[in-house]
Amino acid sequence: METEQIRDVLNGYLKDIFFRVLDIQAKQVSIASKKRLSRTELHSIEIIKDVPDPILTDVADKLHISKATASVCIDRLVKKGFVSKNISKDDKRKSTLALTQIGEDTYHQHKEFHEKMVDSLLKDFDISEYPELLKGLKNLADFFNSY
């Protein structure tokens, strides 16, 4: 295959993967949560679980959204029962965020989706034999992070 054809094939795969991940993720979240969650809400749950002592600013920064948008998102998650706000012991003006049991359950279902996705990528070969693939994926992540 020529370089231009390879580029077209890669572009097609990337677009297909991107749109399918969004679609499947939305369906999985809806099933897991038994309540309708947006992708922003789902990824907020993920950030709250993964960041030590998370606050609203952590969610806004990691999702590249305004603090006002993050605040609305977190308020919805609190109202839906996925997140709790706790006054910070260090600074009474700040609230740390924590997942409720339903938030924890949703996080684990989402994590399972990601694990299955990685497993499907690795099922037919040993990744250590193809360091170029990791380099290419890192370059792609760097590209997305530059925006």
Image (tube, rainbow, N blue to C red):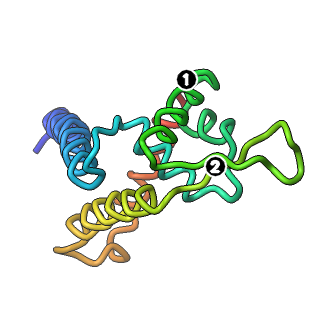
Helix, strand or loop at disc 1? helix
* Nearer to us in this view, 141 or 116: 116
- Residue located farthest toward the left when viewing the structure as drawn: 1
Q: Which mark is residue 97?
A: 2
**Residue 146: percent from the left, percent from the top?**
55, 32
Give me the residue at 48% from left, 52% from top.
46
Give me the residue at 30% from left, 51% from top.
33
Give the mark toward the camera: 1 or 2: 2
The alpha-carbon separation of the residues under discs 1 and 2 comes to 16 Å
Q: What quarter of the picture does the N terminus occupy? A: top left
Q: Name the residue under label 1.
A: 69
Give me the residue at 69% from left, 44% from top.
55
**Disc 1 residue type?**
Thr
The relative height of residue 78 versus residue 100 in the rendered view (above or below) is above
The relative height of residue 59 versus residue 105 in the rendered view (above or below) is above
The relative height of residue 140 versus residue 101 in the rendered view (above or below) is above
**Residue 69: percent from the left, percent from the top?**
55, 23
